[in-house]
Amino acid sequence: MWLLVLLVFSIVFIVLATTRLKLHPFLALLITAFGFGILSGMPLPEVVKSVNEGFGGTIGYIGIVILAGSIIGTFLEKSGGAYRLATGTLKLTGEKNVPLAMGCVGYVVSIPVFCDSGFVLLAPLMKALARKAGITLAASAIALSLGLYATHTMVPPTPGPVAAAGIIGADLGLTILWGLLVALFALAAGWLFATRVAARVHIAADGDGGPELSLTDSPSVIKSLLPIVLPIVLIVLRSIAELPDKPLGAGPAVALLGFLGQPVVALLIGVALAVLLPRKLDRAMLSSSGWVGEAIVAAATIIIITGAGGAFGKVLQNSGIAKIIGDNLTGSSLGILLPFVIAAGIKTAQGSSTVAIITTASLVAPLLASLGLDGDTARALVVVAIGAGSMVVSHANDSFFWVVTQFSNMDVQTGYRLQTVGTLVQGVAAAVTVYVLSLIVL
């Protein structure tokens, strides 16, 4: 019973430390890991060993992947590749279907690019299209916001889902497959909300919408897609090749695919393709003060937070709390929805989707066996369920909330009506999709 009480206090401490005390999540998670281990009665050497193993093991699995994903996203953003993808999508959907176009653009762009950056990058296009189509800015803004959020929270190589997969031990290829599928249903829910609810709120797309990006020097749509699509295809093919019935057979070609489909290798191939995106590659872009340097700095925070989350998870695992909670939750009707509920609570309380994902993954990882969610497919769906929970909800303690409202001319009240409620609708839709899939495949 004491361990359960201690766990509740640990979660409350993480939330209060990061929100009220403004403590960096890395410190909050690390302090919690040591505090839980000591107060749970673990031998002190075992506490230190657990923290070291959890931190090092987690970073060893996903550190390079997060760095590579960050570099790909930075080159896509700064070369104009992400903007080119947006305009290419518009040609497919038509300018009359602006909310659908913006949602689809967000779905694709946010796989490698952070949703905050993606929204800022695409805001000029969003405003220009809303003016041209003569529709309210609210519809296109919310469609873009929710499209970005769908893949940002559920599809690797976005850092949050990658970190969760590393902590939980989920196969990255399976996580990508299920994440893309669930994110499609979430995207559909977000689009319906944008066209049925947000479209009723009139916000004029005044002004010039910010500096328009030129497509003159930006790469083609196909060239822009390659750094995103090729790594995903390689990772997924490797996962298929390694299924028990070996559907792709055996031999040197499959062995090579097994190597190229390793997440680290696949993402590094994506980096090589991303470096070719600028029309003229300047060696300064690859320096510590250039685009690569910026990407590494951006990724470093995510990596150390993820490592601290892994340390906390390892302490929980070695404390014996998994058996206690598992015994109490084995008969719970929540099942696969338990990670969603935990992530939603943490997200709503402290604002960061990434922190919610990493903290929840650390909490549920030791419980999977006792919950009957220990298989490869189950672990992948757990990661997606956590991602779905990390969408619920985006409000004033979330930086993305302010990016959306400020770039969309929304006041705070309107932001709560549209952005906050929209993320609730989308997150619940994703959770329902995960639950239905679990009934079919688990």
Image (tube, rainbow, N blue to C red):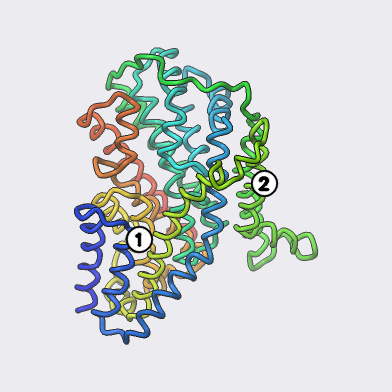
Q: Tell me the distance, in whole angstroms, between the alpha carbons under discs 2 and 1.
A: 31 Å
| Image position, residue 50 (x, y; %) | 40, 78
Residue 435 visible in this rendered orientation of the protein: no
Element class at badge 1: helix
* Residue with the mark numbered 2: 272
In front of the other: 88 or 63: 63
Q: Position of residue 183 (x, y in %)?
A: 46, 44
Q: Nearer the viewer, residue 393 or 382?
A: 393
Number of numbered discs visible in the structure rendering? 2
Residue 59 at what x, y percent from top left?
49, 64
Residue type at mark 2 is Ala
- The vertical placement of 347 against 49, above or below, is above
Residue 242's disc number: none
Between 334 and 285, the one lying in front of the other is: 285
Query: Which residue is tagged 1?
Result: 26
Relative image position of residue 135 (x, y in whole percent): 37, 16
Q: Relative to residue 297, is residue 348 drawn left or right?
A: left
